[in-house]
Image (cartoon, helix red, strand yellow):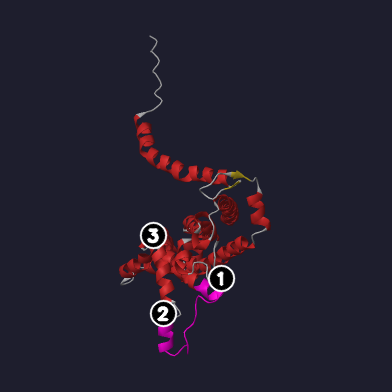
Amino acid sequence: MVQPKKKKIFFKSDTAQAVMMISPMLVGFIVFTYLPILYIIRYCVYNYDGYNKLTFIGLDNFVRIFMRDPAYWESLLNTVVLSSGKLIIEIPLALLFAVLLNKGLKGSGFFRVMLFLPTIISTAIIGLIFSLMFSAYRGVINTMLTDIGLIAAPIDWFGSKWSAMAVLGMASIWCYLGINIIFFLMALQSVPAELYECAKLDGASASRTFFSITIPMIGPIFRIVLLNAIIGSLKVNDLVLASTNGQPGGRTEVVMTYVFKYFFGYSGRRVEVGYASAMAVVTGVFLGIITLIYLKSSNKMTAE
């Protein structure tokens, strides 16, 4: 007897349930990610101040970026220098703290909370705190250094580019160190304890165990943490606005604050939505190139 063919159900109950659960996030992702990108791409070929009529100018905004705006490239260089300097300190320091906290020493719970605490504070507030701490007039740091006799007169930390960049680097490290510690701590806790026991039986030293077992085992998470740290550092914005605001003389301007000020007419600049959109596109391409280079190089290191 021929059995009747069963009708194919396009949406099974589990599939429909999964689609319904992710649809709000998917819609939000499209609305708040792809639509703004299309908005930016559209306006980058126009001269537009946000109020008057759109004026099509073709690629003139991009010509201005590459030929007539050295301040943009200086801000991009500042971003790379600031990101590189802070990551050289932040990532090894986060891994060191994670290793120490993973040992379960006395008081590790307290230090875990204290190290993570800056992560839940607004970045703008952290920038304001550091601007007040390093203030040339009655700042906490200058007062402390003067009282213990290390300096004879207050230091104008924001009076020169490199001292101001150093303050920005310290503020950024303090802000993002905690979240990286948590990621590394999760990775360390996933390493099987049997591997360390075998290494101990074989007489491996602590440094040999760390570099031969710990680092390879947390490698995948290490790659993700480093990639997020690189992208986050290159996109730093509110920390600079709340602390130096590009001072002195715009020499600590980073690329995101530079674009922001043209987009919203901040700090006395004229609103230029079209030009800011073009700069955002160029910056996005730059970030994409950095990400691809990192992924390619990390894949090669993993394969080796």
Quarter of the figure that contains the N terminus: top left
Q: Is residue 56 above or below residue 142?
A: above
Residue drawn at (41%, 21%), measured in percent from left and top? 8
Q: Is residue 285 above or below residue 128?
A: above
Q: Nearer the viewer, residue 6 or 245?
A: 245
Question: Are dots 3 and 2 in contact, CB under 8 Å?
Answer: no
User: Do we see residue 304 in this rendering?
Assistant: no
Span shown in magenta: 140-166
Which amino acid lies under the numbered mark 3 shown in the image of this protein?
A: Gln
Residue drawn at (43%, 72%), measured in percent from left and top? 131
Residue 22 in the image: state x and y as whole percent: 39, 39
The numbered mark, 1 or 2, whose residue comes first in the sequence reads: 2
Q: Nearer the viewer, residue 196 or 130?
A: 130
Looking at the image, which residue sits at the far right?
67
Res 114 → quadrant = bottom left
Question: Are dots 1 and 2 in contact, CB under 8 Å?
Answer: no
Residue 201 in the image: state x and y as whole percent: 43, 66
Q: In this figure, which residue is indicated by the disc labeled 3? A: 189
The numbered mark, 3 or 2, whose residue comes first in the sequence reads: 2
Q: In this figure, which residue is indicated by the disc labeled 2? A: 139
> Left or right of 131: which side holds 283?
right
**Counting other residues with Cα less than 10 Å from the Cα at mark 1, is it few (<14), some (14-19), or many (20 or more)?**
few
Residue 158 in the image: state x and y as whole percent: 50, 75
Q: Is residue 147 magenta?
A: yes
Which amino acid lies under the numbered mark 1 shown in the image of this protein?
A: Gly
CA distance for labels 3 and 2: 41 Å
CA distance for labels 1 and 2: 21 Å
Which numbered circle lies on residue 249? 1
Judged from the image, the secondary structure of the residue bearing numbered disc 2 is loop
Judged from the image, the secondary structure of the residue bearing numbered disc 3 is helix
The numbered mark, 3 or 1, whose residue comes first in the sequence reads: 3
**Counting other residues with Cα less than 10 Å from the Cα at mark 3, is it few (<14), some (14-19), or many (20 or more)?**
some
